[in-house]
Image (tube, rainbow, N blue to C red):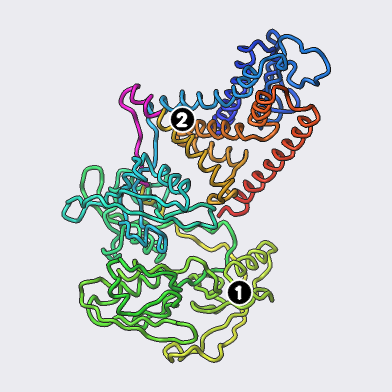
Amino acid sequence: MLNIILVVFGIGLVIFVHELGHFMAARWCGARVEIFSLGFGPRLFGWQRGDTMFQVAAVPLGGFVKVAGEYYDGTTEKEEGTLSSLSVPQRFLYYSGGVIMNVIFALVVMPFVMFAGLPAREAIIGTPTPGAAAWEAGVPANSRILTVNGEDVVDFEHLVIAVAVNGKDGVTLDVQPPALGDGTTPPVQTFELSPKFDEDLGVYRIGLPAGFDPTAKLVVGLDSAAAAAGLTADDHLVAVEGQPSELSLERQLVRAIIAGGAMNVRVRGADGQERTVTVDPKMTPSEQKLVGVAPSSTRIEALRQTGPAAALLTALDLRGGDRILAINGTRVYGADTIQDALIGTAPTGELAVEVERGSARMTLTADLDGTVPPLAVLGDIALSSQQLGTIITVASDSPAVRAGLADGDEIVTVNGVTVDSWDSVLLNIREAVARDMPVDLLVYRTPKGTAEAGEIPASLDEVRVTLQPEQLPRADYGFALAAATTVIRAETFSEALSQGFTTTKRFFADVWRQLQKMLFSEEISTKNLGGIISISVISSDAASQGLAVLFKFLAILSINLAILNLLPIPILDGGHLLFLLIEGIKGSPVSERTFGYSQVVGLVMIMSLMVYVTYQDIVRWFIDKP
């Protein structure tokens, strides 16, 4: 409830500031303000003070200031104290007043935010996404990003936005790799990266996810299995027992969660002492009914030529487009099973990788001399993230297993509908689940004894099964690695003023460049636009993180409102400013006919924009939400 109150107050404050700008400009120029309204539609309550009715209206999607003589018909004498009686510069100031106040709001708020201390994600990265620009360039995992295009990086959000607004122009990063095992700090490295466009998100990205706390601090849920076992937020993860030490702590956790059952974790407490804690997960049913099938993804999208296993990959003669079938005789169906197979491979001897290439199967071999761990091979391979095929893996203790499905089966039809991609499989299964219907599958299965034949079988076995979706049990351990966070705080108020001004200037430049990329180059998709639903959700999340984060968001929202109102669209402030420029140049206002038609066009444009962003909000928060 407190967050809801803060959200309503915050959004109302930004609107109030904008309308206050118009109100102050009108009064300063000598025009009478008849109505000052927060919201549109029927008045809920208000009070009269002087010439002005101050009111709160029913629809909280904006606000307005009604000035006497604002809509002059050009047929009567101009009355003193009306907007139409003001000079062009005075009217220009009036229509600019909201934008000016929105910028002033950000300039006033941000120094206080910086002085109070702003929680933020540190500019520490995780493991670069395979196939992305940062992965191809070899940016080390767990590094700290120091600068982007020569500008000091404030936090992780700064990095993401800088990449997006630079678009296809690319970015130059100065990177501090993590400390080595002996405690020495490697030299700073510089990388020039060419981002790739992400169709799903509609922006250019370089594939650098946010990293975890460098000290492996834990986040422990209240009333969770981890809390019951004795883990606390002061603990730091040292290792997951039973997991290979060459894996990162993140991968050790993931591997243990996939395995299920009790997890033994070694942690270091606040007193510096290490101990082992056994966490028995709470089994909770999935929110949705499932059948227990997932896509298999072993097709090689790209190979990194500069990684630690580059020479080994060359010796194997792996190629983009190959589908990995087995490693040293162990069948694999995705990154996790490839990882397990490589972990079980001896550091010396022969590495055999069976692949499907075109219409043939072949076994590729290379000698291991102990200098490169077999697991390094996976780090230099990018598996296809586009799950185009219908080959599946099955979850243990699921309807799929009980019906007789197996890893490697290929789904051909779902309830009689032919499917040719994982998206179509998922869509048809979800439709059956929504109707509470069983799922009938026709699958192709490779006949036994053909896996090592060297050729793709001429025919496949057909298997028909019927699945009844269930709410599958899910293991909840109740803890995770903490994100790498920091608090950006100015030591003095003069420093806060400087930081606040710099940050506001960056916000303004970023929003303006994003708008340019969206309108003129399509380097940022319009699917990133958001309306009142997105504003409410994001502001609620910001409020839950504290007042400093909320007011930072409100400052950004205020800048967005300022720039939106500067657009030369009739009915917006920018449209009025455009007509005033025309009037100043030609010496007379545009005709009432032209002005009237323009307002109708502007209204249609704004209403169309509102419908579009509302649609995007619904897709973002209700349809595509996982």
Residue 545: image x %, image y %?
Answer: 45, 36
Count of numbered badges drawn on the protein: 2
Q: Residue at x 70, y 33 (%)?
A: 570
* Residue 212 visible, this angle: no
Q: Earlier in the sequence, mark 2 or mark 1?
A: 1
Q: Which mark is residue 420?
A: 1
Secondary structure of residue under mark 1 = loop
The amino acid beneath tag 2 is: Leu
Q: Which residue is situated farthest in the right direction here?
A: 75
Along the line of sight, which residue is nearer the eye, 498 or 16? 498
- Vertical position of residue 575 compared to residue 245: above or below: above
Residue 150 placed where, x, y %? 34, 43
Would residue 256 appear left or right of 387 to someone viewing this image? left
Residue 175 in view, yes or no: yes
Q: Is residue 343 found left or right of 509 in the rendered image?
A: left
Q: Secondary structure at mark 2?
A: helix
Q: Magenta residues, as a range?
A: 483-500
Q: Quadrant of the C terminus?
A: bottom right
Residue in the image at 58% along x and 77% along y: 411
Q: Give residue 547's mark.
A: 2
Amino acid type of the residue tagged 1 in the rendering: Asp
Q: Quadrant of the N terminus?
A: top right
Q: Position of residue 27 (x, y in %)?
A: 63, 12
- Displayed quadrant of residue 462: bottom right
Query: Could you say which quadrant of the image residue 29 lies in?
Result: top right
Distance, label 2 to label 1, CA atoms, is 49 Å
In the rendered image of this protein, does residue 61 appear above or below residue 470? above
Q: Is residue 49 magenta?
A: no
